[in-house]
Amino acid sequence: MSLITTLARLEAVRTGRAQPAATVLHRHLSDHPLVLVPLTTAGEAGAPLGALVGTDRDAPHLLVVPQPRDRDLRFAFLAELADIVLPYVDGYAESVEAAERNETDPETGKRVKVEVELCADAPQLILPSRAGVDFVRLLGRSMRFRRTAEQDPETPYPAPPRVPLLGRWLTHFGERARVPGSSLLLAMTDVLGRHWSTGQSTLEDQHLGALLAWIDPPQGRSGADAALEAELARDAHGQLLHPPAGPATDPAFDNKLLAPALLRYDRARTALAAAEDGLEADDRLGALTAAEQEIRALVASRTRPTWDAVWRGIDLLRTLPEGAHAEERWTRDRWSFTSHRDRVVAGEPPQPRRDDAVTAANKLAAREREQARLEAQEALDDPLVMAGRRLAGEAFAGEVTDVVMTYSEGKRPSPRPLVTVRTDDRPHLGERAKGYRALGGKPQSAEFVGYEEEGALVVLKILDKMGRGKEPETGSVPEKGDRVCFTLFEHEQRGGAKLPDPEDTPWTHGGPPGEAVQETADPLTPEDVL
Amino acid sequence: MTTRTFDPGAEAARATDAILHDTLHGTHRGVVVDSPPGAGKSTLVVRAALELADAGRSLMVVAQTNAQVDDLVLRLAEKNPELPVGRLHSSDADPYDKALDALANVRKSAKAGDLTGLPVVISTAAKWGHVKVDEPWAHAIVDEAYQMRSDALLAVAGLFERALFVGDPGQLDPFAIVGSEQWAGLSYDPSASAVTTLLAHNPELPQHRLPVSWRLPASAAPLVSDAFYPYTPFRSGTDHGDRRLTFGVPSDGSGPDRVIDAAAESGWGLLELPARHTPRTDPEAVRAVATVVRRLLDRGGAATSERSPDPAPLTADRIAVGTAHRDQAAAVRAALADLGVMDVTVDTANRLQGREYDVTVVLHPLSGRPDATAFHLETGRLCVLASRHRHACVVVCRAGVSELLDDYPSTEPVQLGTLVKFPDGWEANHAVLARLAEHRVAWRP
């Protein structure tokens, strides 16, 4: 934890309110996000209990699995989910703009510009918490290898038509969420935690109710009080007043309310199956419907508070203006969305269970680049974030007190002005350290020359972005009296090493992975069948 | 007195011969050499390079940092000034050590094409990753292979037919700045070390070990070996009494002077400050580190060792300060400047890897911390900091680290399919602390 975060958390404790950790919004927020609040069944990995989902905060769709261990009901739930999520995703697939991309020409091997489509906007999924994001990945993995009756008439338990496709999309969202700074799939607790520092630990910040209590406590109460209540307060029947954001449910709810309701549902179903005539069946169907309604009401009661909390979080985030570079990162999200759309359209197989060596290495390198880029961009977009970097000695700001013109040695002397900056910051400048400042959106680099007046003055030599002439272009060199901010970290990231194609994987990494095989869904176990 | 059944010179020579034999005449595509701190890894690399060049095999050498590359080029030129060597460098300003310009047989270029045909070409893994060739090199030497990431090896492995991998398994593992749990357990986990991936796919490759540390004194080798290399023990090349550290100016009785005397006597010294939770750049601890360095210089130290019969003066370039974080290193540098000390190396464990000094002063990674995170517990970090010295190591630390360790047992999740590393940082930290406690000087600045 950085020093400024520690200070902000201490201040939050003292004031009883979360303190801003950012002055702008560092993630893109869609105008029409799809919010998903899933619940899972205790002890049954990957068995959803229900969900609230939708784009309209006043009219969420309630989806419920009245018996989560029943495969058919689970499939019915997933099919319903697909009917809501896929049209939402497809809605962004059609509106495109023309864009250019660098590709390697297969014949000449040269890099050429290719006209391609780029989706004008992309869908955005918002989950309440990080555990919800993991659940999305789990659902994706459980669905994408399923086969529909159309794909394979022999498959023993065919999935409803659009379920495997939903699995592929959820997998894509889940995988993209691992890229730092991406916004296709967001966990509300993470985004809020990025923009506010509370007086509790980051682990406690994973509780959406407690986090909101710190950021926006009820009138006249301290955040600490309200957060404690959000976590612990129970009613006369021992039920939490603020149910957890899921997907896991509270054990008291499971034991006292859910288990008896499931039992009643099971009994009603058995009774219906045993009905001997139409009249009896009618009666028993009524009982079954009532039992199902009861479970629906239970699931609704446990998801609705979280649903409302997520939208409250969105409201809070919308009070912040979007950071300057957030749009650029969202464009990369749009590229990611577009390319997956193209893979689906081209009929490519679902994402494999495990990445091959080359794909894994490429992903890791890309994410590390994005992480470094995100850290730099957040600092450049936001003076409060930059203040944290300055406090950590990774940047400094101050007023230019002197500019002396010097020139580089060599045949064609280029300008190398010496700029003296008065600063109260204590940057960790080593011998000949590089510094960078943003100049018209591009980084201008400078070299540390020395200190004067015991560190109060920093002397830098500007190295580039001054044009080709002997005299620097106007505005390219700071002037006396200017406020400047130099960072010790680079603003832009270099591309990494070019990795071999997967079919050229070297012997050190096991050689080529061989032909891709059609992956199948997880094998059936006795526990899968009720 | 003591009968010496262990002849370090003969043991080391035997190991080296076996390695060179497998490298030059073996049938496997790779050879792996584990080398504990100061066991002559660089000497081995230089020797293997010369013999491979002699045998007419085109050779590329992969090191991890530019400093390591330049160091290797200089050592090669020292051993064989006639051998043409290519130094492939980046296109940044000042890409290589200026000392290379004085070497007639070293050709430097930012383009691999300019260096084709030279018997030996040396560069960093990052630079090699951008090189493309039609004809791969016959042989490669990968230096510091345990600090190289698996994905970096993936980028360069197509450039060579066979390779010798040399490194120290006890030092810092490579790291990624983003989570990589997704690939944990895969044989080619891109965030694992190059050697881990190599051996997972090629378990039949011959593995060798250098058995003797020439750097670590007899006082340090057993502790470092027990604490960090419990299953692959090594010995010190020198015996107790072979090295001595003396001071012309007697102790003034202060804490720093007493801990210096303790370290000169036993090889280890612990300067313990009162327990307290502090920010990372704990001003008192930083000042204590700087004071110890100042006194080391002021007291006219002299180091006697097997290298020369006459005592060598303990000068600033023979002392280093090691920290866990870069801001701590910066704070120590500032404190040293306040005391008028220049030219003492102050750096983090990552950057001190592979370096050697007479005396090191270490700011303990857990000093003053309220918690023990995986970063601070990492075995390799402590191992690097505790194994850079030829004579003595002084550790500056707040009291209470043992209790802190007991409060924070390792709780990292166990990933299926990954090799659990032994010893864990928790255990290694306790082992080192127990030994340091024997040479403890409590001091209230």
Image (tube, coloured by chain):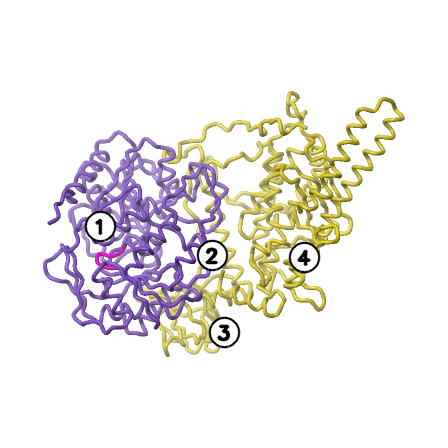
Chain colours: A yellow, B purple
Alpha carbons under labels 4 and 1: distance apart: 69 Å
Q: Which mark is residue A230?
A: 4
Element under disc 1: strand
Residue receiving disc 1: B106
Q: Which mark is residue A492?
A: 2
Alpha carbons under labels 3 and 2: distance apart: 22 Å
Residue receiving disc 3: A483
For the C terminus of chain B, the quadrant is bottom left
When asked about the image quadrant of residue A40, the answer is: top right
Alpha carbons under labels 4 and 2: distance apart: 42 Å
Element under disc 3: strand
First of labels 3, 2 by sequence position: 3
Residue A197 falls left or right of residue B378: right
- Rate crowding at label 2 as few (under 14), some (14 to 19) or many (20 or more) other CA atoms within 10 Å: some
What's under tag 4, amino acid-wise? Ala
Mark 3 or 4: the one toward you: 4
In front here: A2 or B136? Answer: A2
First of labels 3, 4 by sequence position: 4
Range shown magenta = B388-392
Residue B369 drawn above or below residue A498? below
- Magenta-span inclusion, residue A174: no
- Rate crowding at label 4 as few (under 14), some (14 to 19) or many (20 or more) other CA atoms within 10 Å: many
Contact, mark 3 vs mark 2 (Cβ under 8 Å): no
